[in-house]
Image: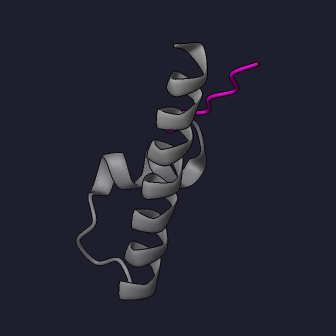
Amino acid sequence: MNLSINGFNGFSIFTQRFGTAGMLKSTQEKKERQQKAQSQIEFFENQKRI
């Protein structure tokens, strides 16, 4: 089962609208960690399908 919530949360909508300017460094780093984790999940989900 592949569950994907690509960018469907309030934080993502905020950053899409306003970008990363004005964000706290810790908030920006958290967002980067979340994006990295999501990309790794997608990679391994795709590997399972092969």
48 with respect to 29 (left or right): right
Task: Confirm whether the magenta stretch covers residue 21.
Answer: no
Name the residue located 52 percent from the left edge and 13 percent from the top edge.
50
Quadrant of image for the N terminus: top right
Could you tell me residue 9's position as x and y percent?
Answer: 60, 44
Tally of numbered tags: 0
Q: Is residue 1 above or below residue 39?
A: above
Q: Residue at x 39, y 85 (%)?
A: 24
Instruction: Please give the name of the residue rendered at 51% of the width and 23% of the height, measured from the top-left corner.
Output: 46
Q: Nearer the viewer, residue 1 or 30?
A: 1
Q: Position of residue 29 (x, y in %)?
A: 40, 76
| Magenta extent | 1-7
Q: Residue furthest top?
A: 50
Q: Quadrant of residue 39?
A: top left
Q: Name the residue at the right extreme.
A: 1
Q: Residue furthest bottom?
A: 25
On screen, residue 47 versus residue 3, left or right, reads left
Q: Give the residue displayed 28% in from the left and 78% down from the top.
A: 22
Q: How is the image coloured?
A: one colour
Foreground residue among 17 and 38: 38
Q: Is residue 28 above or below residue 18?
A: below
Main SS of the magenta segment?
loop
Q: Position of residue 48 (x, y in %)?
A: 60, 23
Residue 3 part of the magenta segment: yes
> Where does the image place residue 36, in percent across and percent down from the top left?
43, 56
Say whether residue 25 is left or right of residue 7: left
